[in-house]
Image: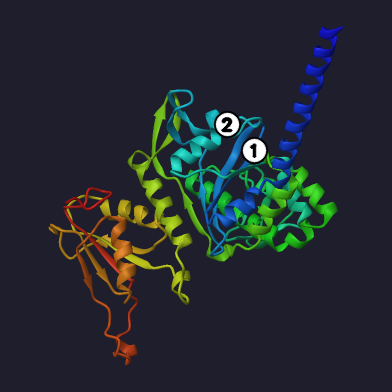
Amino acid sequence: MRKAKIDASAILFVLIFLLFAGGVVFLVLSFRSDPIRDSLTGDRVINTLFVIEHNDKPVSSYVLMYYPATGRAATVNIPGSLGLIIQSINRVDRIDTVYDPRRIGPFANEVGRLLGIEITFSIVITLENLGKITDLITGVEIFIPSPVSDYQSGYIIFPSGVNILDGDKAKTYITYELPDESNEIINFRRQRFFVEFIKRLGEQNHFLNNPRAAQIFHSLLKTGINQKTQTNLFNEFAKIDTGRMGIQSVGGNVREVSGQPLIFPHFDGSLIKEIVRQTLASLVRPTEGLLGDRIFTVEVQNGTTVTGLAGRTAELIRGFGYDVVSTGNADRNDYERTLIIDRSGYQHVARTFADVIRCTNIRFDSPEPDETEVDIRNFEYRADFVLIIGRDFNGRFVAN
């Protein structure tokens, strides 16, 4: 009898403990902060991986980097054919080899490792659901410079000019490939659609917050986060000025491995990490007046005997968000030291540009502040910076 009472007391104690523990867990979950609110109050960049997939494989992938305090954002395209040493499988292969729609964590980790950042959220949209979302937001506007036709039938798929893509057209736009198109053009086109897609979601944000529309919209996304957090996240994205959004892509050299062409990132991936680092710095940097909106222009001149160096350097400079307006040879080919000529009048901006290639040889050649008279007859366009490549440039940095 005494043993039965002890057993009953023990069971009662266990039940009380479980109820208490359950209450504590409930309170913790009830008062736990929203991840978006944590990001906002923590003054951090929100890095979101977007994957558009078809048949359980990525069609295209992007990382959207957004800093709420300034409302500025940038996006980086992640080609699926990037060749990397995949740590999780310990071999060289395509980055999308580790993609699993049921468990996106390993893919997100590889992307974050590639860019040198932490992925905050991941959003997967199937190609079919992309079409449904596009129809839900009444289309995505795209400017197409030249008409696109089916190379077999000759049928015009997209006329030139401004097109409003419905769901079916959107799916076609990001999947078609013409025989003479390079991977760079295909990736750029898809990235332009992604930017316009984000823009249209922002324009339709009020509609998407309608309970019925929100239920449909969020059912078409695979995120691993609850609907409230999804809503808060897209409410933040609605504040992005897509007209100022920086657009980057992971570039590299194509090499064949096991019978398939892979793109190996320039300089073993250090270049894209540096580009992302400087991009993040520009997102968080407070801007004064219109200077933060300005894209600075560059002339690249080859002052060495190395053939093609100006063109390769121009690709490098464009990766950091500068507009290279011309490339060519310098006045001579025996420059020992790389030289940057600043014509912008913003010495701090010139030094930031010089930091891209670690150049300390800068000549400030901007007009004096009191020179207000301009003879239009002598006017000619001049870039903000002239980069003259010398023998001390190793293709990435100026060597000491």
Q: Quadrant of residue 383?
A: bottom left
The residue at which mark 1 appears reads as 53
x and y, in percent, of residue 60 in the image: 58, 42
Which-is-in-front pick, marks 2 and 1?
Answer: 2
Q: Tell me the quarter of the picture where residue 302 sits.
A: bottom left
Tag 2 near tag 1, CB within 8 Å: yes
* Left or right: 10 in relation to 325: right
Q: CA distance from mark 2 to mark 1?
A: 10 Å
The structure residue drawn at horizontal position 30% and vertical position 72%, both measured from the top left corner, is: 347
What amino acid type should be assigned to the residue bearing mark 2?
Tyr
Pointer 1 local density, CA inside 10 Å: few below 14, some 14–19, many at least 20: some
Determine the residue positioned at 32% across, 69% down: 348
Under circle 2, the secondary element is loop
Outermost residue on the bottom side: it is 373
- Badge 2 density bin: few <14, some 14–19, many ≥20, Cα 10 Å: many
Residue 351 vs residue 115: left or right? Answer: left
Q: Residue at x 66, y 61 (%)?
A: 238
Q: Nearer the viewer, residue 399 or 284?
A: 284
Whether residue 48 sits left or right of residue 305 in the image: it is right
Q: Position of residue 251 (x, y in %)?
A: 42, 45
Q: Which circle marks residue 99 in the picture?
A: 2
Q: The N terminus appears in which quarter of the rendering?
A: top right
